[in-house]
Amino acid sequence: MRAMNIANDKNRDAQIVFDAEVKARSTQWVLPDGKERMNVKILKSTVNLEEDALLDKYGELTDVAEALIKSDPEVDMEVIGKILHRTHKLYVDKDNEIAYSINLYQVIHNPDGTEKERHDLNKVPANINVELPLKWTNKTFQKKEAIRRFVFSRKYQLRHINGVTFDFLYNMAKQLQESNMMVLIGAGKKGNEPILLTRGGEPYRGFLEGRIQEDKYSLILHLTDIELKPLEDEVK
């Protein structure tokens, strides 16, 4: 579980933890003989067999085509089709050499494909467990409105770490259930900044949903980066 610093509508904050609730599948896929299905990774090709490598080796496309007809240099029967077990993700440069230091950017494009802006993802730290807590805003939405207006791509369950934080989260969940509302929360002094779960991660808007049942509670943080708008607004 990961830690989070969050405040309620009275600006009283507490450190709690959160995690993603993963549910086991109720169905199981099996093969015709009844054995359990197993996913495997198979090697499709290697760098030295790709088109750019062949062009560097033979020169022109016509020469590459002639080589393909005569000797099939794009096929290596010793490696193609091998089953991969443990793999690691590596970044390489334009010469296919391993890059040991990289900079990641988020690039936002205009509708015509031109670049609108870019952000350096490496230097934007997470903001969920810092001195300034995630804050409630004055923006609330009926649940029916929220699920039709926003695309929620992630959700996490907030959990207490002691008796004090149990009461803290329980009261938040109770307030949201009684009002049948979801409240927008955010980072920063005014709570109007996006939520960053990890350093260099995607920015999200967060919505809290609360439910209670007797002495039990469920407080769920829904995250979204997509807002659906009516077609007539786009036309205007």
Image (cartoon, helix red, strand yellow):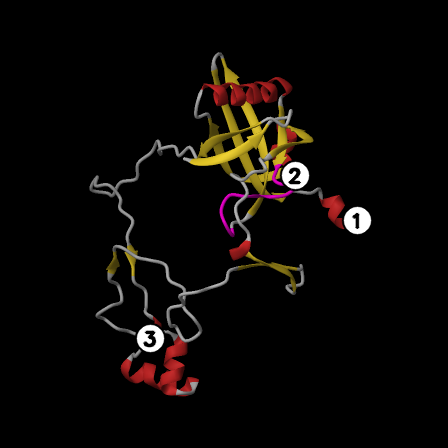
Q: Secondary structure at mark 1?
A: loop
Residue wearing tag 1: 236
Q: Secondary structure at mark 2?
A: loop
Q: Where in the figure is residue 51, as x and y percent of width and height? A: 40, 76
Mark-to-mark CA distance, 1 and 2: 34 Å
Mark-to-mark CA distance, 3 and 1: 52 Å
Mark-to-mark CA distance, 3 and 2: 52 Å
Residue wearing tag 3: 48
Identify which residue is drawn at 51% across, 43% down.
197
Q: Nearer the viewer, residue 106 or 236?
A: 106
Residue wearing tag 2: 189
3 vs 2, front mark: 2
Relative side of 14 to 180, left or right? left
Q: Does 196 appear in magenta?
A: yes
- Asked where in the image residue 113 lies, by quadrant, the reply is bottom right
3 vs 1, front mark: 3
Magenta residues (range) = 186-200
Q: Does 124 appear in magenta?
A: no
Can you say which quadrant of the picture contains the N terminus? top left
